[in-house]
Amino acid sequence: MRMGALALFAVLLSGCGGSEPAAAPVQPKAAAPKRVPDHRSNLALENQVSSRMVEDHMLDSPKLPGGSLGEYESKGKKYQMFIIEAASGQEAALILFGYKATLQNPEYISYMGGYYGSDGKQPVYIFSKKEYVAGIVGLGMTEADPMARSLAGRLH
């Protein structure tokens, strides 16, 4: 009897787990897309036609992340204003420096900590302040400079 009970126990043990399908490996959850902060309220309202959020690649540039973009029109001229929020002032400076490399003939603007140049399609005035990268697109330096100064004053 003892031998029969041991044999039965051995049979039962050998059948445990062998016929069940293996559990599927646990897949890590994909990280939720980073939400772009909305700074449209800091864009100038004068001459604004529209504003929107750009999830990634502001100005269609792979060097720029997403942010807030305003479209403007005044005296037959169309231009844009944008604000990008970085994680830190250092990251904002790196974004600015990376984008500078895409500008043709970038002119350093020391009092703004930025650059004025052409991205091949249009003139761009871009600067960083604290954790922000912001700028004016589509206007000459003399027109863009007072707008950029005003925009910088609205960035907290």
Image (tube, rainbow, N blue to C red):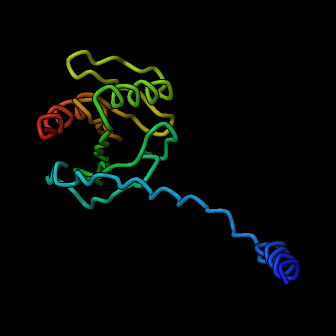
Q: Looking at the figure, which quarter contains the C terminus?
A: top left
**On screen, residue 16 above or below 144:** below
Q: Give the image location of residue 58, x and y in percent.
A: 42, 46
Q: Nearer the viewer, residue 42 or 31?
A: 31
Residue pictured at 31% horizontal, 59% vertical:
52
**On screen, residue 105 above or below 71:** above
Q: Which of 73 and 60 is in front in this view?
A: 60
Q: Give the image location of residue 49, x and y in percent.
A: 25, 60
Q: Looking at the figure, which quarter contains the N terminus?
A: bottom right
Farthest front residue in view: 1
Q: Give the image location of residue 7, x and y in percent.
A: 87, 77
Q: Left or right: where does residue 133 sit relative to residue 20?
A: left
**On screen, residue 100 above or below 43:** above
Report the number of discs: 0
Residue pictured at 42% horizontal, 43% vertical:
65
Residue pictured at 45% horizontal, 50% vertical:
56
Q: Give the image location of residue 136, x and y in percent.
A: 29, 39
Q: Which of 150 and 77 is in front in this view?
A: 150
Q: Nearer the viewer, residue 65 or 89?
A: 89
**On screen, residue 88 above or below 36:** above
